[in-house]
Image (cartoon, rainbow, N blue to C red):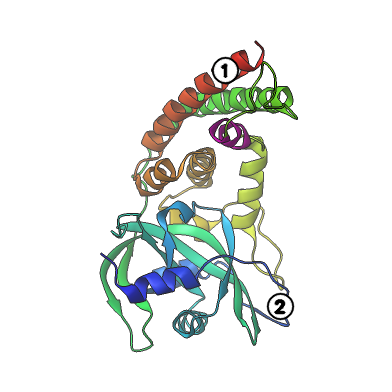
Amino acid sequence: MPSMRLLGLLASARALSLEPSLTLHSPLMSAAKYISSGHDELGLLPFNLREAMLIGETKQVHLKDPRLVALFEKALDHEGCVGQLLVTDSGSLASVSSLLEITEVRTRDAGMWADLRAVGRVRIHDVSQTEDEYVNAHICLHTDARLEQPLPMALVEGVQETYSSCHRLARRLREKTRGRSTEGLFEAPSDSQVAVANQFEVELESIVKQRREVMCERGLDASPVDYLDDDVQALLGVSNEEAAELQLFSFCAASCLGAHERAHALTAADTVERLKFTTAILREKEARLAAQLALAGL
């Protein structure tokens, strides 16, 4: 079980969006340099497992706790990298977590605001507490197994088709249930129905495009690259752009899944396995959406 100190840190790391007064910029894509330089320790920012970030996702956090501010100040001196410390509802710690880059920091009397992006994954060992009382751990890069050729494009097409079907069904379900009253013959859609429909508001192609742009950014003082370059490939454990694109796609497709399913996708060390797992869950959601749509039309 995590200590009360850890739970306090977790509570202090909730995401907020407030207006800053001072802006500092951290260099981007420095995680690859940090890892390639042989560093095997990383400061960890506590999150609930439900807030696990998949590769290409971004988050803004507001830090008030002096321990977390010290963590970020230390990180900014060491390539701007931190990790997620993922805590389950039962209090256990996930062994695989996201490697984050601090892309922007803003400070004010009320604390520190920071923008983060997930650029890789790490396996966590030997969690400890530093003199500044933030959580630190020995880490190693966690990557997918090397893909055998040819790449599984039929599997990719299956994911795309199933996700597109879910997107269409969800849009029709939202249209059918919009403004429905609880009075009379029909009941209002349940929270679970709304949640499933809302998971597919954005087309998969748009998600991939946005996450790819995130991974290609190189800061305000540098132009973005136009492909998933050597730094990205090193963090993903691949040797070519095609394999990097496929792995990023697999995480994008998994982003619509539930919290525990996303955690499984984060931990998986095989791109094909992740795609197959995601396809199975998407088909379940497709059937559920189709059933809900049929009931809504009664």
Q: Position of 167 compared to 144: left or right?
A: right
Residues in magenta, as a range: 191-199
Query: In the structure shown, which secondary structural element does the residue marked by tag 1 occupy?
Result: helix
Image coords of residue 39 (percent x, y): 36, 75
* Quarter in which the N terminus is drawn: bottom left
Q: Position of 220 compared to 49: left or right?
A: right
Q: Foreground: 262 or 19?
A: 19
Residue 192 in magenta?
yes
State the residue position of label 1. Answer: 290
Residue drawn at x 46%, y 28% is 279
Image coords of residue 286 (percent x, y): 53, 22
State the residue position of label 2. Answer: 20
* Quarter in which the C terminus is drawn: top right
Q: Foreground: 128 or 236?
A: 128
Query: In the structure shown, which secondary structural element does the residue marked by tag 2 occupy?
Result: loop
Residue 26 seen anywhere in this rendered image of the structure: no
Badge 1 crowding class, 10 Å Cα cut-off, few under 14, some 14 to 19, many 20 or more, is some
- Vertical relation: 202 (above or below) 27: above
